[in-house]
Image: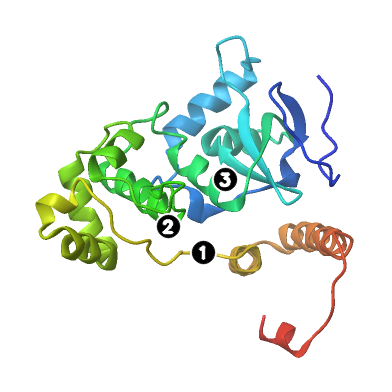
């Protein structure tokens, strides 16, 4: 197994695991549908990794989507956290190419088939990602029935519940479906219209991460803060080298 050059711009279609730098993986907290990271699971994974537990039926590689040249974590939050706590700098990963919407939906559904069972509120979060990334829209532009949505969500929630969630979380879609087909019951099996897309830009996510780093820096010791500053300078240099950039008045807002 070789280390992947994660700074290249070439398209990657990867089915075999490669080793990548953890620092090169962009982690979007808003893509994590779980309410929080489970500390017990992280500790279990730490012990497995300390005993060499990778592959061979132990801990599988994390899954990463390459989106416009950036690696984005879609499956493996607990595993990556365990490795970071162990001081590891690389991780085994399976890389596949995807659009931003495809990657976000892959992250939302990663725990539907494995891992800790999702709580109802977490399944609802998956449903909302399902809608906002437009997985519910057929190639023809029509919207799937609620029963079809239930199948897409691995029957983890009934079509009746999906109907209720749609009315509460995406009322314009639910209303259009009910109006178009005469009543809510018929709407469960027929089509409506697409909701507005809920999108968080890479810039907004990156700025939020920097703001979080500042908040974490305040209670640090001088030595810890010095380490963080040195690391941050390296990050800034990396950002400057990532591609063309300009300075504008808008930058002063951040």
Q: Give the mark nearest the N terminus, 2 or 1.
A: 2
| Residue 155 image-quadrant placement | top left
Q: Nearer the viewer, residue 235 or 203?
A: 203
Q: Which residue is mark 3?
A: 103
Q: Nearer the viewer, residue 54 or 141?
A: 141
Residue furthest to the front in view is 140
Q: Is residue 222 above or below residue 250?
A: above
Q: Give the mark nearest the N terminus, 2 or 3.
A: 3
Location of the N terminus by quadrant is top right
CB atoms of marks 2 and 1 within 8 Å: yes
Q: Which residue is mark 1?
A: 199
Residue 132, numbered circle: 2
How far from the left and from the top, in percent, is residue 179?
Answer: 17, 65
How far from the left and from the top, in percent, is residue 61?
Answer: 63, 25
Q: Residue at x 78, y 57 (%)?
A: 227
Is residue 246 shown left or right of residue 107?
Answer: right
Is residue 6 shown left or right of residue 92?
Answer: right
């Amino acid at each position: 197994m070789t280390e992947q050059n994660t700074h290249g711009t070439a398209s990657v279609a990867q089915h075999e695991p490669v080793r990548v730098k953890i620092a090169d993986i962009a982690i979007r907290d808003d893509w994590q549908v779980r309410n929080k990271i489970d500390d017990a699971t992280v500790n279990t994974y730490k012990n497995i990794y300390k005993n060499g537990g990778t592959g061979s039926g132990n801990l599988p590689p994390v899954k990463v989507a390459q989106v416009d040249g950036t690696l984005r974590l879609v499956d493996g939050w607990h595993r990556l956290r365990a490795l970071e706590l162990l001081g590891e700098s690389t991780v085994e990963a399976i890389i596949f190419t995807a659009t931003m919407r495809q990657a976000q939906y892959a992250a939302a559904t990663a725990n539907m088939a494995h891992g800790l069972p999702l709580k109802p509120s977490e399944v609802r979060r998956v449903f909302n990602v399902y809608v906002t990334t437009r997985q519910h829209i057929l190639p023809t532009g029509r919207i799937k029935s609620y029963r079809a949505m239930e199948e897409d969500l691995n029957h983890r929630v009934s079509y009746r519940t999906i109907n209720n969630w749609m009315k509460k979380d995406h009322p314009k879609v639910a209303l259009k479906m009910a109006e178009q087909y005469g009543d809510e019951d018929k709407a469960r099996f027929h089509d409506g219209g697409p909701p507005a897309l809920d999108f968080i830009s890479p810039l907004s996510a990156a700025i939020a991460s920097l703001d979080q780093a500042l908040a974490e820096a305040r209670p640090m010791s001088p030595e810890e803060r010095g380490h963080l500053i040195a690391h941050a300078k390296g990050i800034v240099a990396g950002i400057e080298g990532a591609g063309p950039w300009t300075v504008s008045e808008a930058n002063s807002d951040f």
